[in-house]
Image (tube, rainbow, N blue to C red):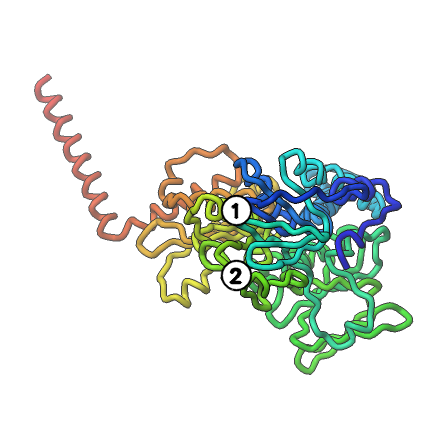
Amino acid sequence: MTNFDSMDLRDEHDRKLVARVRPEAYRNPEPADVYDLVVIGAGTAGLVAAAGAAGLNARVALIERDLMGGDCLNVGCVPSKLMISSARAVTEIKQAAGLGISISGEPKVDFSEVMTRMRRLRSDLSSHDSVERFTELGVDVFLGPGRFVDCTSVEVGGRILRFVKAVICTGSRASVPAIPGLDQVSFDTNETIFSFTELPERLGIVGAGFIGCEMAQTFSRLGSRVSLFASERGVMPMESRDAAEIVIRGLHEDGVRIFTHGRRLEFEADGQGIRVQERNGDAERKETVDRLLIATGRTPNLEGLELEKAEVRYSDQGIVIDDFFRTSNSRIYASGDVCSRHRFTHAVDIMSRSVLANALFKGRKRYSRLVIPRCLYTHPELAHVGVEPGGLDDQGRKFTELTLPLSDMDRAVIDGRTDGFIRVYLKQNSDRILGATIVSDNAKDLIGLFTIAITRQIGLGAFSRMVFPYPSYAEAIRKLADKYQKSRLNPTLHRLIGKWHGLNRYLFKKLNRLGKGSS
């Protein structure tokens, strides 16, 4: 299935979206003799690369086989966050009583209106990714599947596009695991779930990563009975366990039922819906759901590119690139999900900016030097940037860990949001920040301060000299800096400071006596 197939062209908002990102009447232009840059794929990676190159006066061609905007606009970040926004409002209304606000009755969710709002705002935002906008920027937009003809040429719609440099930005799609019975039942992925018009009474979600956790909490808040099936690695396995446990508590509070199935999971269709059978050790449990969302990871989009003709190496994990984003063909670069383990829109953006510097101006921007944060948009949010604590241990690097619970933060107490923490990982015997983890309602915003600090090599101690509004969550970073400064007061230094104060007291008394005697 393509993103285009998930659009309901009977809906005015989807029609508006498609008219912008894949207009029916559009005809591909005649190709230029040669392009400075040919971009394959018009998701975030490709759009950033094409717009940036055109702004630098390069001759650019942009190829898209499906919908401009890619997953982010059509079936990813934009629709998911719009649904999360609606679901958060439901919980805030329910929790109003704890703030002294009386609201009679339960909030009523109109799921159809929630999805209409999502489609309307998604179509409004589509103007940024439209064919018209990029044509006005001077980009030659070609709609249709592209494939390499040789090391310097791409074919699309029967036209040959020759290039000095090219960048592959074809992204990724939902991977479908080989689980017994899955091929015998109907299931959804991120490519179809946002086309729902009716709220499923019972929703099963397989996969407890970013998409699985966010959609589990969202649909549960909107009224579905959600069962989340996690592998033996648990919920959000890439995160520290105490951080993940707070997210799990939040999911439980919103009614999400979590099952850890190990590697033993089976599906079967019956007259009541889809039966999910999960086993954990000797324990066995069966759940029946009406809809099933598969959220078990991503697969790079490589099909149809004919990479062998361009002498571009690849594997099941995606296109192989060096630290400068080059493929095995020095004229061809890659950016985004198709070549990176950092499958986030903001990561894709900075990768494409780096590709432009390297491909067009012989820059030396390195993939390994990118500082890329990540954020889970549940309640509370979970964000991380920098090295992983486990990675530090594996490398034999010693580090110091400082943690501030939100219960020690006035702002969090005021808001009644004290389940969480802010943690920083420092190089041992130094204030150099190696990484940070935040579990908080606004973790997505706070993590940016640590991202700046790591990128610009600002030590934690510097934050103790910075002023933040009171009361605010940003104050937590200053509190962590104060905690670090206090930790530097070892017993010897503590005694020396005490002696310094004692000397001042002695001099004060002596001078005071001399002053009295002379008078």
Q: Going by the picture, which residue comes out furthest to the top?
A: 519
In this view, the residue in front, 372 or 244, is 372
- Give the residue displayed 35% in from the left and 55% down from the top: 427
Q: What residue type is labelled 1?
A: Ile
Numbered mark located on residue 518 in the image: none
Q: Alpha carbon of mark 1 to alpha carbon of mark 2: how far?
A: 26 Å
**Residue 180 position by quadrant:** bottom right
Mark 2 lies on residue: 240
Decide: few, some or many residues near mark 2? Use Cα within 10 Å; few <14, some 14-19, many ≥20: some
Q: In this view, does 366 lie to the left or right of 178?
A: left
Q: Is residue 492 visible?
A: yes
- Give the residue displayed 38% in from the left and 57% down from the top: 400
Q: Which amino acid does label 2 sit on?
A: Ser
Vertical side of 146 occupied by 395: above or below: below
Which image quadrant: the C terminus?
Answer: top left
Vertical side of 190 occupied by 61: above or below: above
Q: Is residue 217 left or right of residue 494?
A: right
Vertical side of 236 occupied by 68: above or below: above
Under circle 1, the secondary element is helix
In this view, the residue in front, 152 or 308, is 152
Residue 222, horizontal then vertical, whole percent: 78, 50
Tell me which numbered mark, 1 or 2, is placed earlier along the sequence. Answer: 2
Q: Which numbered mark, 1 or 2, is in the foreground of this view?
A: 1
Mark 1 lies on residue: 350
Q: Is residue 420 visible?
A: no
Residue 318, horizontal then vertical, whole percent: 58, 63
Q: Going by the picture, which residue comes out furthest to the left?
A: 518
